[in-house]
Each structure stands twice: as C-alpha cells, then as structure tokens.
C-alpha cells in the first residue's frame, strides 16, 4: 500500500491578496481552480510539483477566520535560506527568526503560520543545537 500526502487546505478572506503573497513568499503558482458557486478552490503547486496548497475562498465573506491558539503550520525547506529570509524580511511578514538553527516563521495575510527552514535542517540540527548551547 502506498500513501501519499496530496495537499493541505486553508481558508482565506481575500483570494487575490493570498495568491500574490504565496507567489511572492514561496513561489507557489496557481495550477487550477474550481468554482463551486458559494466558494472557490484554488490549487497552488510548488516548483517541483511535490506539494499542493488548496486555498478556499468563500465569496462574500467579510470576517477573518479565528485561528485560535492552534500551533498548526505549513513548513517549507529551501536551499538558499539566507536569500529567502531577506525576501521575507522585506515583505514584513517574518514573526520569528533563529538564524543559528536556520529557520524562521512568517504569517500569511490571514494569519496562518509558515515555517521556513534550511533544506538540510534536520541533518544538521544536532550540530546547530550544540553551537547554541555554548
């Protein structure tokens, strides 16, 4: 039996704002969309087509979504961490940075947390943690 992760879904208040954010911040591009009448589903793909983010936009909704204290987040690995961190800092969406570990968090326009980490984050984590303790 093979099981494959297919997508993650979030709900957004302003579809165009969210599409622009995910393109600028993470290079996620619209692959397809479906209009269901009251709501629209837009499917974004990463450059390697290994991850899909499904964005649901409810037409006419004017109130933001209550995300609560749930620590759920999306996570992305990147081969040029420093460059992407600078992009996110210029965008003004960074909420936490730990450059020694090679990770940072940002928030999308609807308040969803996104973790960005070096591509080799887990392989080098013990080494980086040891350096932080000294």
Image (tube, helix red, strand yellow):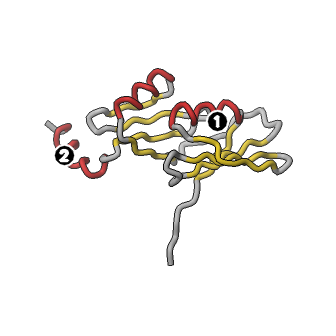
Q: Position of residue 100 (x, y in %)?
A: 26, 35
Q: Bin the neighbour count of mark 2 within 10 Å (Cα to Cα): few under 14, some 14-19, many 20 and up.
A: few
Q: State how far apart marks 1 and 2 are (Cα).
A: 37 Å
In screen coordinates, is 76 left or right of 126? right
Task: Residue at the far right: name it.
Answer: 37
Asked which secondary structure carries label 1, the reply is helix
Q: Quadrant of residue 132?
A: top left
In the rendered image, the vertical position of residue 62 relative to residue 4, given as above or below: above
Asked which secondary structure carries label 2, the reply is helix
In screen coordinates, is 81 left or right of 110? left
Marked residue nearer the N-terminal end (1 or 2):
1
Q: Position of residue 67 (x, y in %)?
A: 61, 42
Identity of the residue drawn at 60% across and 41% down: 29
Quarter in which the C terminus is drawn: top left
Name the residue carrying label 1. 19
In screen coordinates, is 14 left or right of 131? right
Identity of the residue drawn at 22% across and 43% down: 129
In the rendered image, the vertical position of residue 11 relative to residue 84, given as above or below: below
In the rendered image, the vertical position of residue 86 relative to residue 34, given as above or below: above
Are the two marked residues, 1 and 2, in contact with CB atoms closer than 8 angstroms?
Answer: no
> Is 19 in front, or is 31?
31
Q: Nearer the viewer, mark 1 or mark 2?
A: 1
Q: Bin the neighbour count of mark 1 within 10 Å (Cα to Cα): few under 14, some 14-19, many 20 and up.
A: some
Task: Residue at the far bottom: name it.
Answer: 1
**Mark carried by residue 127:** 2
Q: Position of residue 116 (x, y in %)?
A: 42, 40
> Is 122 in front, or is 26?
26
Q: Position of residue 101 (x, y in %)?
A: 28, 39
Question: How many circles with numbers are drawn on the protein?
Answer: 2
Identity of the residue drawn at 66% across and 30% down: 17
């Amino acid at each position: 039996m093979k099981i494959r992760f297919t997508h993650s879904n979030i709900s957004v208040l302003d579809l165009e704002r969210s599409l622009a954010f995910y393109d600028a911040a993470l290079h996620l591009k619209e692959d397809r969309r479906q209009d269901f009448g009251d709501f629209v589903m837009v499917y974004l793909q990463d450059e390697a087509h290994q991850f899909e983010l499904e964005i649901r936009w409810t037409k006419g909704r004017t109130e933001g979504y209550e995300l609560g204290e749930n620590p759920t987040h999306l996570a992305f690995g990147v081969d040029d961490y420093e460059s992407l961190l600078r992009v996110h800092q210029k965008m003004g969406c960074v909420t936490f940075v730990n450059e020694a570990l090679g990770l940072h968090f940002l928030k999308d326009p609807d308040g969803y947390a996104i973790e960005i980490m070096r591509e080799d984050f887990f392989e080098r984590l013990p080494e980086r943690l040891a350096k932080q303790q000294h």
